[in-house]
Amino acid sequence: MTQIADIRFDAADLDTFAELTGLLAVLVTPDGKMDGGARKVNALTRKALTRAAESDAFAKAKDGDVMRLSFPAGLAADAVLIVKSPAKPDQTIARRIGAQLAKAQGKDALTVLLGKTARAEDIALGLALRSYDFNAHKSGTKSEPGAITLLVDDPEATAKAAKTGMAIAEGVFFTRDLTNEPANVLTTDDFAARLAAMQDLGLDVEILEEDDLKKLGMGALLAVGQGSASPSKVVVMQWNGGGDDAPFALVGKGVVFDTGGISIKGAAGMEDMTMDMGGAGVVAGVMRTLALRKAKANVVGLVGIVENMPSSTAYRPGDVLTSMKGDTIEVINTDAEGRLVLADVLWYAQDRFKPCGMINLATLTGAMLVALGHENAGVFSNNDDLAGAFLKAAGSEGEGAWRMPLAPAYDKLIDSSIADMKNTGGRYAGSITAGQFLQRFVKPDTPWCHLDIAGVASVKSETALAPKGATGWGVMALNRLIADKFEG
């Protein structure tokens, strides 16, 4: 797993500032005010910070932006990083400060003078999240990232406050690594093994193999994977930190590679389908975070892991499948496979665990990108309270989400003349009909949300807290939801 940056917290010693090497970062308010540490650096550099703060470039900078003063006189440091920051940054700005510093750091050691700055733990989280670098498959010597030291007034209290953030960062990194991995590495066997290894963190992990799935009647999930040499699996991860309460369930689509099957995709961009297990990746990352921070909640994470390949054994358009629920499904398009995987896992989650609520995540439809682009995930739900709680949690963590409709009027689009339903309703309202399909496998008394993360799981350009590639979207929001709803 990609390692999180080593972030240490220490007390400031003004007398040592001149000897600090690497990069030295200070915070300056929009009107040029500085704390004691920054004032010391300003004096050592003969008021270079004051001159920078009075420049047009600083005036035009946004909160969290970084100005670099290279080879400053009076200091051993290679550069001073001047960060524009309000006197009391909010969570979003604090995390942006950390992210911008991580971008500026490179491989140099970094010392950040924070003193009494509010939300130092969020600055640390921003540093950790933006320092992510997936280089597992690059040849040559890999240089280690430079050490990061945050100088604060109360190092022990700040380190304690930052501990939860580091658990979140590890969950996000785990999700990003899984989503970034190529399919010849992250096979169905390898994916399951990585999840099984989390037993060392205190999770109870169970792997259901194909024979188990056949006995359970998971005909929809098994059909998707029957064209691949890689065996299909369901992995169940349980975290029991909440006593005797019914668990909350997270369900993820884990298609390690999606060719589209017999309804094969076009060649252009098919390489991106290594990320089609992004929903399962988020579930795994959340479970890792919960275990690391010893969450006082009962949560079960279930992921259906398959590969959708064309072959002589692949399922076909026109086939009729029988789901674990017993409903039959006419296959119109084998590239609408994620909902087939989720249908069986959703039913199994309810049948076995009787959850108090359930959220599934999937890179489900290209129509979601058309509707919301890369800024928001689509939120579909049968329960206003659960949907509202999730949207609040996502907003609190800065992860974009937007509620989409579900309504009986869309059901006619997936009606079949030869089975109980079709697996796709065609081009129009594609994301909604996918949600309607999934809702048929949710019991009426189970609060449920479907999150279509096709546009947010992996992106082609950097985001506020991540380089391009897998984002880990959803780990922070779901961790917050669980903390607020079950631990508050």
Image (cartoon, rainbow, N blue to C red):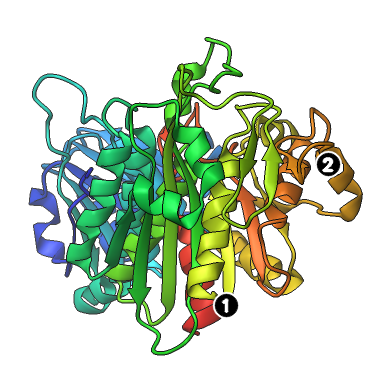
Image depth: mark 2 or mark 1 in front: 2
Q: Which residue position is annotated with label 1? A: 356
- In the figure, is residue 108 to the left or right of 163? left
Q: To which quarter of the image does residue 372 belong?
A: top right
Where's the N terminus, which quadrant? Answer: top left
- Element assignment for label 2: loop
Q: Is residue 87 shown to the viewer in this render?
A: no
Position of residue 449 measured from the top left corner of the image (x, y, whole percent): 65, 60
Give the mark nearest the N terminus, 2 or 1.
Answer: 1
**Residue 6 percent location from the top left of the image:** 17, 53
Report the disc number at residue 198.
none
Is residue 84 found left or right of 177 in the rendered image? right
Q: Secondary structure at mark 1?
A: loop
Identified at 23% across, 47% down, the residue is 193
Task: Report the residue marked by disc 2.
Answer: 415
- At horizontal 44% and vertical 58% (from top left) the residue drawn is 302
Vertically, is 394 above or below 465? Answer: below
The amino acid type found where label 2 is placed reads: Asp
Closest to the observer, 33 or 98: 98
